[in-house]
């Protein structure tokens, strides 16, 4: 929140980060338990300028209160809620209850506890840690205007073939050899926005955010890899990223834009020689795995609103 004070423009917000809440839903009928672990960060935009300029703390909602609210709201969710719904519940609370709070931003990252399968059967109360993380960012304004983003973090994907990189711009510093055949590895971070603009949009048509997250993830993964046997050729990370984002926008009309970040994690062919004699020659088989440096490739695709007219 910005304000003009003396000669200065003051922009400020406050909140609490790394509020780690775990919630179990034990159903009365003794069926499987549901469990989530969320890392919640909250930022409140509020009329708190006197606290900064005149040491007047009276408008500050203490960050300790903000933290407590996460646990109070987790307790009061008697039914399973998605992270996005929990973000809406928190954002609505802070903007409704406190006159000085104009907007609340809630960011949640879910720890990937997956239900264990034992002898082919889903366990009722056993969970093990998986890999990629579901994320969300929910912004709620006092007016009821909302922005809801969902996303994925740390989705590592690798293919051992069906990738190349050729005909790129070359100059006197270019030493990279063109490749028709290489491996491709990345760790995807994605985030997408839903066409939900007001709290009333959410209450009028209940939205299954968790299912949507799983569906979007499947489209991203399937597009990256292609069919199981033959895969799909990637002429660059850039093109693969574009195909993945496009597939999501084509498939889900309720998503207005998607941002993908796909680092190019390099596996370098191993070629070792001694006295001009080869000790190890990479024939598409032995590589050195590197973590740095890595290529950074990211893009955002949004619907061209003119194309809707
Ligand atoms: O798919 C790629 N895109 C690049 O921009 C790039 N740059 C590079 O060195 N290797 C690759 N690979």
Image (cartoon, helix red, strand yellow):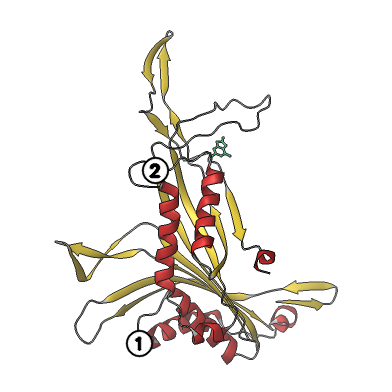
As measured in the structure, the alpha-carbon distance from the residue carrying label 1 to the one carrying label 2 is 44 Å
> Residue under circle 2?
231
In front here: 215 or 176? 215
Residue projecting furthest to the right: 7
Q: Is residue 42 left or right of residue 130?
A: right
In front here: 2 or 193? 193
Residue 110 showing in the rendered view: no
Q: Where's residue 39, x and y in %? A: 44, 69
> Residue under circle 1?
78
Q: Is residue 68 left or right of residue 98?
A: left
Looking at the image, residue 139 lies above or below residue 284: below
Counting residues from the start of the chain, the first of labels 1 and 2 encountered is 1
In front here: 253 or 166? 253
Identify the image quadrant of residue 117.
bottom left
Give SS at disc 1: loop
Residue 129 showing in the rendered view: yes
Identify the image quadrant of residue 52.
bottom right
Query: Which is closer to the viewer, label 1 or label 2?
Result: 2
How many residues crowd mark 2 within 10 Å: few (<14), some (14–19), many (20+)?
some
Q: Where's residue 254, x and y in %? A: 53, 71
In front here: 125 or 39? 125
At a point 43% along the width and 66% down the height, the residue shown is: 213
Q: Where's residue 99, x and y in %? A: 64, 91
Give SS at disc 2: loop
């Amino acid at each position: 929140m910005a304000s003009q004070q003396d000669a200065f423009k003051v922009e400020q917000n406050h909140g609490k980060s790394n509020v780690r809440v775990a919630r179990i839903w034990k159903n009365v009928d003794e069926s499987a338990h549901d469990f989530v672990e969320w890392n919640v960060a909250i930022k409140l935009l509020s009329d708190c300028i006197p606290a900064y300029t005149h040491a007047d703390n009276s408008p500050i909602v203490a960050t300790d209160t903000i933290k407590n609210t996460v646990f109070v709201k987790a307790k009061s969710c008697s039914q399973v809620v998605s992270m996005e719904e929990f973000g809406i519940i928190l954002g609505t609370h802070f903007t409704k209850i406190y006159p000085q709070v104009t907007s609340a931003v809630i960011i949640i990252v879910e720890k990937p506890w997956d239900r264990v399968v034992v002898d082919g059967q889903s366990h009722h109360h056993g969970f093990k840690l998986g890999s990629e993380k579901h994320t969300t960012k929910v912004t709620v304004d006092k007016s009821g205007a909302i922005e809801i983003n969902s996303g994925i973090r740390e989705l590592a994907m690798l293919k051992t073939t069906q990738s190349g990189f050729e005909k790129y711009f070359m100059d006197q510093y270019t030493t990279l050899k063109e490749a028709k055949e290489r491996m491709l590895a990345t760790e995807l971070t994605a985030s997408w926005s839903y066409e939900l603009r007001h709290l009333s949009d959410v209450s009028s048509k209940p939205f299954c955010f968790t299912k949507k997250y799983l569906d979007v993830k499947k489209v991203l993964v399937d597009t990256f890899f292609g069919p199981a046997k033959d895969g799909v050729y990637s002429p660059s990370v850039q093109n693969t990223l574009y195909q993945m984002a496009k597939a999501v926008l084509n498939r889900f009309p309720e998503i207005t834009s998607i941002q993908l970040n796909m680092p190019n994690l390099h596996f370098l062919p191993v070629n070792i020689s001694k006295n001009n004699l080869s000790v190890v020659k990479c024939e598409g088989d032995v590589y050195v795995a590197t973590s740095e440096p890595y290529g950074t490739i990211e893009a955002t695709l949004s619907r061209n609103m003119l194309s809707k007219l």
